[in-house]
Structure formats: structure tokens, C-alpha cells
Image (cartoon, grey):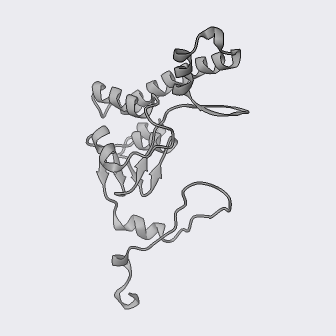
Amino acid sequence: MALKSHRGRKTVIIPHYAMSGGTLIALAADEILMDPHAVIGPVDPQLSDPSGTYPAATLLKVLEKKSVNDLDDKTLVMAEEARKAIKQMEDFVRKLLEDSLPKEKIEEVLDELVRGKYTHDHGIFPEEAQRLLPGKVKIGLPEEVYELMALYKMEARPRRPGVEYVPVIPSHLIPSKTK
């Protein structure tokens, strides 16, 4: 909300991915610049307990498929928390987008990003992001972004799953004497 409240024009640059919280930051901006291969992701709430992490929307689906008498108290409590979490995220995303998209389009964004249409790790590529957020998303980054990124190598941690950035300088940025 601090980003949204800032008076100046806000541009978010996504060279690789902005998932979950990163997507929320992007939604608060006036403009989102995405590399052609970058992704944003769903902001659907996830609830955790000692035995795992569960998508809020999926917990609510359990209530639709099973009788309340067939569920343990823990599942019922988690499902109620899931209902609240989804409502809270819907309200938050509405607030982020209320000045930039019509209400019907915001509802579509909520269906796509908040209500469990996709798994939490689903990547939404720039063309789809443009359709979902018309006028906010532009494909392509200034060359200076890649030059800056080349200066910072991402720490590689052994045995840690995930996406890692390995800087590669685009060939058109390499001085001709070193090609």
C-alpha cells in the first residue's frame, strides 16, 4: 500500500519472475515492464500447519465434496481460515487495482489470481498478463536492466530447489573486440 500511495509514477521491472508477493508489488504499480520470458504468479492464499502448506481454495473445495460430519475439527478450522484469507486477499487486490481497472476486469483478475484457478507456482507470461491487466503491462526491458543484472551473480545454494539467475550478457552488448 505504501507503493500504491506514493504520488509519483511507479514502474515495476520484472526480468525473470515476480511470484506471489512480487505480483502484489507489481499490481500496486502504474506500469509493469516484463522481459518476454518473465512471469507473474497467483496471489492465492496458502495456509500452513506443521504437516504442510495448503491452498486456501482447495481447503474450501473439501467442504463442498465431503460432509461436515466426515471432517475433523482441524480441517474445519483451516477451511474457515481459508475462507477469511481469500476474502482478505480479494479485498486487498481490489484496493490495489481500483484506480486502474474497471470493476468487471478486477473480478476477472480475482478469478485468475486469487480464487485458486491455478496452482500457486503457475507462471503467467507477459501476453496473458497484458490481457489480464490491460494498459499496465509492457513487454520488453531497457538494456540498462540487463547490464545492471550482469554485475550481480545470484548466490547458488546446493540442494535448494528453485529458480536461480545466472547472468548472461546479451551478445549485442558485448564490445566487438571481444566477440
Percent position of residue 64, x then y: 51, 15
Q: Residue at x 37, y 84 (%)?
A: 175
Quarter containing the C terminus: bottom left
Percent position of residue 79, x then y: 59, 19
Determine whether 50 is above or below 71 in the image. below
Occupied quadrant, residue 159:
bottom right
Q: Tell which of 12 and 84 is nearer to you.
A: 84
Determine whether 5 is above or below 171 in the image. above
Q: Tell which of 95 and 178 is nearer to you.
A: 178
Q: Residue at x 65, y 12 (%)?
A: 70
Percent position of residue 105, x then y: 29, 30
Q: Residue at x 50, y 33 (%)?
A: 44
Q: Tell which of 31 and 115 is nearer to you.
A: 115
Occupied quadrant, residue 3:
top left
Q: Residue furthest bottom?
A: 177
Percent position of residue 116, x then y: 47, 30
Determine whether 64 is above or below 171 in the image. above
Determine whether 173 is above or below 26 in the image. below
Res 175 seen here: yes
